[in-house]
C-alpha cells in the first residue's frame, strides 16, 4: 500500500493542477467506461445510499468481527508499523502518551472498523434480482483508499457509518462496484472515509451469459 499527505490549502485560488490533486483511486474512477446494457450482480445505480446507520466500535479484548476474527491486541502483536500510541499496555503518562490523550487505531485497522459491520448495511430494493439468495459469485476486494478527514480514530469509541455507491463497471471477467463509506462521530463530524472496490467474477456463475441477456431486457435507471 501507499500513503500520502494532502497539504492544507487555505487559498482556493491557488493554481494547482487537477491531476496533482487526484488520488490513485480517483484516477481509477475517472477511467471507468460506460456499461453496455445491465449487469447481473450489480443491480443498484450509482448514487444509491444505504438506508440505515451502522454503529462501529473496536474494543480491547474483543474480536472485531467475522471478517476479522482477532482482537486488536492480537493484531498489534504482528503488524510492522507498531507504535506505543496504538497500545494500551504502553499508554500512561510517562511512556509515550499520544497527543490525543488516549490510544488510537493503527492505520492497518482503519479498514477493519469501516468494513466489519458491512453485512448489516440495508439497501433499497433493486429494480431486478436474477440470483437466488443461495447463489452468489466469487468476490474479491480490488482497490481500497482511506482518507482521515478529522482523525485519528480511537479504540473503544463508537462511530456511525453510512455507505454510497459511487461507481459501477465491468471488465471482460468481472463486474465491479465502488462503495464510499463515511464514518462520523457522535457529533456528526466526518472522521474518515473509505472507497472500496468489490469485484465479482462473472463465470463463477455457470449461466452468466444467459442471465446477462435477461438483465439487458430490463428497463432500469442508468447504472
Image: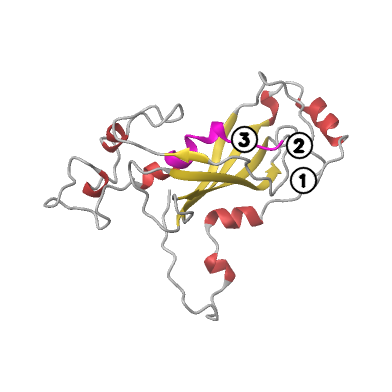
Disc with the residue nearer the chain's start (3 vs 2): 2
Task: Give the spatial CA distance, label 3 vs label 2.
Answer: 20 Å
Q: Residue 43: where, in percent of width, then height?
A: 73, 37
What colouring does the structure picture have?
secondary structure
**Callouts 3 and 1 close, C-beta under 8 Å:** no
Left or right of 128? Residue 195 is left
**Callouts 2 and 1 close, C-beta under 8 Å:** yes
- Numbered disc 2: secondary structure: loop
Q: Quadrant of residue 221?
A: top right
Q: Residues within 10 Å of mark 3 (few under 14, many from 20)?
A: some
Disc with the residue nearer the chain's start (3 vs 1): 1
Q: What residue does disc 2 label?
A: 39
Residue furthest to the top: 134
Q: Which residues are magenta?
A: 112-124
The structure residue drawn at horizontal position 29% and vertical position 30%, both measured from the top left corner, is 61
Q: Choose mark 3 or mark 2, whichever is in front.
A: 3
Q: Quadrant of residue 157?
A: top left
Which one is nearer the viewer's eye here, 148 or 178?
Answer: 148
Left or right of 150? Residue 223 is right
The structure residue drawn at horizontal position 81% and vertical position 44%, both measured from the top left corner, is 36
Which one is nearer the viewer's eye here, 94 or 186?
Answer: 186
Amino acid at each position: 500500500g501507499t500513503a500520502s499527505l494532502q497539504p492544507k490549502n487555505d487559498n482556493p485560488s491557488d493554481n494547482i493542477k487537477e491531476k496533482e490533486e487526484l488520488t490513485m483511486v480517483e484516477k481509477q474512477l475517472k477511467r471507468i467506461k460506460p456499461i453496455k446494457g445491465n449487469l447481473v450482480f450489480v443491480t443498484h445505480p450509482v448514487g444509491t445510499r444505504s438506508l440505515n446507520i451502522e454503529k462501529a466500535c473496536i474494543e480491547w479484548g474483543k474480536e472485531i468481527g467475522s471478517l476479522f476474527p482477532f482482537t486488536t491486541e492480537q493484531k498489534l502483536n504482528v503488524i510492522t508499523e507498531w507504535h506505543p500510541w496504538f497500545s494500551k499496555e504502553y499508554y500512561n503518562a510517562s511512556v509515550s502518551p499520544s497527543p490525543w490523550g488516549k490510544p488510537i487505531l493503527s492505520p492497518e485497522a482503519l479498514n477493519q472498523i469501516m468494513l466489519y459491520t458491512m453485512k448489516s448495511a440495508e439497501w433499497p430494493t433493486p429494480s431486478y434480482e436474477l440470483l437466488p439468495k443461495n447463489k452468489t459469485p466469487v468476490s474479491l476486494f480490488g482497490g481500497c483508499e482511506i482518507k482521515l478527514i478529522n482523525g485519528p480514530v480511537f479504540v473503544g469509541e463508537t462511530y456511525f457509518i453510512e455507505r454510497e455507491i459511487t461507481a459501477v463497471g465491468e471488465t471482460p471477467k468481472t463486474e465491479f462496484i465502488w462503495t464510499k463509506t463515511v464514518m462520523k462521530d457522535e457529533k456528526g463530524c466526518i472522521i474518515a472515509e473509505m472507497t472500496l472496490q468489490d469485484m465479482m467474477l462473472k463465470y463463477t456463475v455457470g449461466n452468466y451469459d444467459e442471465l446477462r441477456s435477461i438483465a439487458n431486457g430490463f428497463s432500469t435507471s442508468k447504472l
